[in-house]
């Protein structure tokens, strides 16, 4: 296995000057950004849990059509015939 210390030191010499160029006064998300993200994640989780509960109540089976003429009506309420 080749010696990795040379490549690590080469990478560090190139990355350290980049880290020194970072402006300390830049705005970062910080704690408030994390709190907003966490609240949104909990809200999505709650909505998904609620949706699964409601979808469990839905019956996807169709009811069989009525056989007698009096019960067989269309959407307008008129008897078939």
Image (spheres, helix red, strand yellow):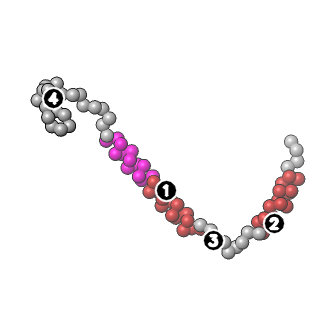
Residue 81 in picture, x, y percent from top left: 14, 26
* Mark 3 Cα-neighbour bin, 10 Å: few <14, some 14–19, many ≥20: few
Q: Determine whether, in the image, residue 31 is placed left or right of residue 57.
A: right
Q: Where does label 1 land, which residue? A: 41
Give the distance between the C-alpha atoms of the residues marked 4 and 3, in whole angstroms. 71 Å
Q: Residue at x 15, y 37 (%)?
A: 77
Give the distance between the C-alpha atoms of the residues marked 1 and 2, in whole angstroms. 37 Å
Q: Where does label 2 land, which residue? A: 17
Q: In this orientation, which residue lies closer to the viewer: 5 or 49?
A: 49
Q: In this orientation, which residue lies closer to the viewer: 37 or 8?
A: 37
Under circle 3, the secondary element is: loop
**Residue 80 badge:** 4
Looking at the image, which residue sits at the far top?
A: 67
Q: Is residue 60 above or below residue 69?
A: below
Q: In this orientation, which residue lies closer to the viewer: 7 or 18?
A: 18
Work out whether mark 1 precedes mark 4 in sequence or the reverse, and give the earlier one: 1
Q: Is residue 39 above or below residue 20?
A: above
* Mark 4 Cα-neighbour bin, 10 Å: few <14, some 14–19, many ≥20: few
Q: Does the magenta segment cover residue 56?
A: yes
Residue 37 in picture, x, y percent from top left: 52, 60
Give the distance between the C-alpha atoms of the residues marked 3 and 1, in whole angstroms. 23 Å
Q: Residue at x 39, y 45 (%)?
A: 52
Give the distance between the C-alpha atoms of the residues marked 4 and 2, in whole angstroms. 84 Å
Work out whether mark 3 precedes mark 2 in sequence or the reverse, and give the earlier one: 2
Q: Where does label 3 land, which residue? A: 27
Q: Quadrant of residue 21?
A: bottom right
């Amino acid at each position: 296995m080749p010696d990795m210390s040379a490549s690590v030191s080469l990478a560090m010499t190139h990355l350290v000057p980049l880290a020194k160029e970072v402006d300390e006064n830049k705005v970062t998300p910080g704690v408030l950004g994390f709190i907003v993200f966490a609240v949104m994640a909990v809200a999505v989780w709650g909505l998904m849990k609620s949706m699964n509960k409601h979808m469990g109540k839905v019956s996807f089976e169709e009811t069989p059509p009525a056989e007698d003429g009096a019960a067989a009506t269309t959407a307008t309420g008129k008897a078939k015939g």
